[in-house]
Image (spheres, coloured by chain):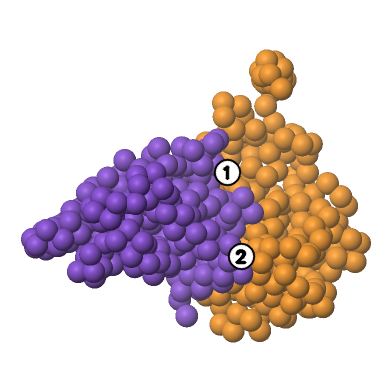
Amino acid sequence: MTQGQTQSADPGLAARRLTCLRGERVVFAELDFTLSPGGALILVGPNGSGKSSLLRLLAGLSRPFSGALTWNGSDIAQDPDAHRARLRYAGHQDAVKPTLTALENLSVWAGLDGLDDPEDRAGRALAALAMDHVADMPGRYLSAGQKKRVNLARLALAPARTAPLWLLDEPATALDRDSIDRLAALIAAHRRAGGMVVLSTHSDMDVADAATLNLADFGATADDEDESQDEAAGVPA
Amino acid sequence: MSGFLRLLRRDLRLALRQGADAAMAVLFFVLCVIMFPFGIGPEPGVLARIAPGVILVAALLASLLSLDRLFQADHEDGSLELLSLSSLPMEAVAAAKILAHWLVTGLPLILAAPLLALFLNLPTDGFPILLLTLLLATPLLSLIGGIGAALTLGARRGGVLLPLLVLPLYIPALIFAAAAVDSVLTGQSARPHLLLLSGLLAASLPLSPWGAAAALRAALE
């Protein structure tokens, strides 16, 4: 459903021969994938295999060393504003301000995305992740999992047609079982509405018929690996 | 409401809830100026002579005090990343945050300045021109400082690097601002100094958010 289509005119997101460097080290090379509307792609691989780097590339937060990312066949680098508008990125940091309440935190983002009635939307989005009971609690009193849920509630702010591409970097971290199920339901609803999800995970999240991309398969060759380990060993702790 | 105003309102709300930041800048300003009579001696003539310079230098240092947090808090908690992905251009993000910095630290300094001028025995005909130069100079401090704060973002010991980077750039503003007050006190026209100061402000208004935005983008890469 999500992989195996190579024509560039396909709707959705496609990566062609993507190579990512960190410093002088190749994180992954010659990576290809396609993601069609309604699809999901799960990134797996050991620590340091480039899951977060790939998500940042897809978000346009960094640029690939070589290769291209296309949306509906056109390079995303040609219209970064349009790409930013269509994606929602949730990284490792939750961007929750300690002095603002959960609702205020979320309505700021709703407002900055140019959505109407930001407070209303934020309230409904918090409810989608069962966070409405702490809506008026300042960010500093929220637990790690609750902060994560406030951050993930940004996904529920806009309909899938406004922001079809979700990029989630280990969204299940710090979440309890019920919250993971709610997130999975959110993802399923998003995909039913034609949205796309790319997420990295270590734990088993229930994402129906999703394609899996193991970044270890695209890693540096064995020689490079040894070299980088030598370098790492040479750095004083 | 535009994204610019929303971000400005968020930053002002954060500053008000934390409160301490704005109060700290003003207290530092007051204490800094009060140190001078102790160090130099309470001769009214000497104090009146140095008053404009002392107040301007103290204002400059007070505005520097909270500058390293300008983008850092948002950088550390991931907000800056999300802001860079929002529909708001990075230049507008930088401009909104710089304006918030001026409203929170610059404006209270202007309000506290008459009291300090009184302490230092500044002649009363120097008061209006002192406030006017502060009104032109303090936004300049936030604007120039904004570029420095963005450039030192993510740098190790950025808090020390920032004053080293920014203080030399403050010199022109300091020269013209102090000269404007001095010229009124010696019975000359302050107009040329005020025009130069306004010129500096007019140049940094568009250039500073633009430069800061470029530095922020580099910091996020």
> Disc 1 on helix, strand or loop?
strand
**Which of the labelled discs sits on residue A16, or is there none?**
1
Tell me which chain appears orange: A
Residue ID at (86%, 50%): A203
Q: Amino acid at mark 2?
A: Gln
Q: Quick one: label 2, few (<14), some, or many (20+) residues within 10 Å?
A: few
The image shows residue A119 at horizontal and vertical percentages of 63, 81
**Is residue A80 left or right of A5 when viewed as pictured?**
left
Residue in the foreground of this view, choosing between A69 and B199:
B199
The x and y percentages for residue B140 are 31, 57
Residue A152: x, y in percent?
Answer: 72, 64
Q: Are marks 1 and 2 on the same chain?
A: no
The answer to whether residue A87 is left or right of residue A126 is left
Quadrant where the N terminus of chain A lies?
bottom right
- Residue type indicated by callout 1: Arg
Q: Which chain is purple?
A: B
Q: Which mark is residue B217?
A: none
Is residue A188 visible to us here?
Answer: no
Relative vertical location of residue A108 with respect to residue A64 in this rendering, above or below? below
- SS type, badge 2: helix
Count of numbered circles in the view: 2
Marks 1/2 in contact by CB < 8 Å: the verdict is: no
Residue lying at 83% horizontally and 74% vertically, measured from the top left: A130
Residue in view at x 27 percent, y 45 percent: B171
Look at 76% across and 60% down and name the residue there.
A148
Q: Is any part of residue B188 visible from this angle?
A: yes
Which residue in the protein does label 2 denote?
A: B18
Screen quadrant of the C terminus of chain A: top right
Give the Cα separation between the discs numbered 1 and 2.
47 Å
- x and y percent of residue A31 in the render? 64, 39
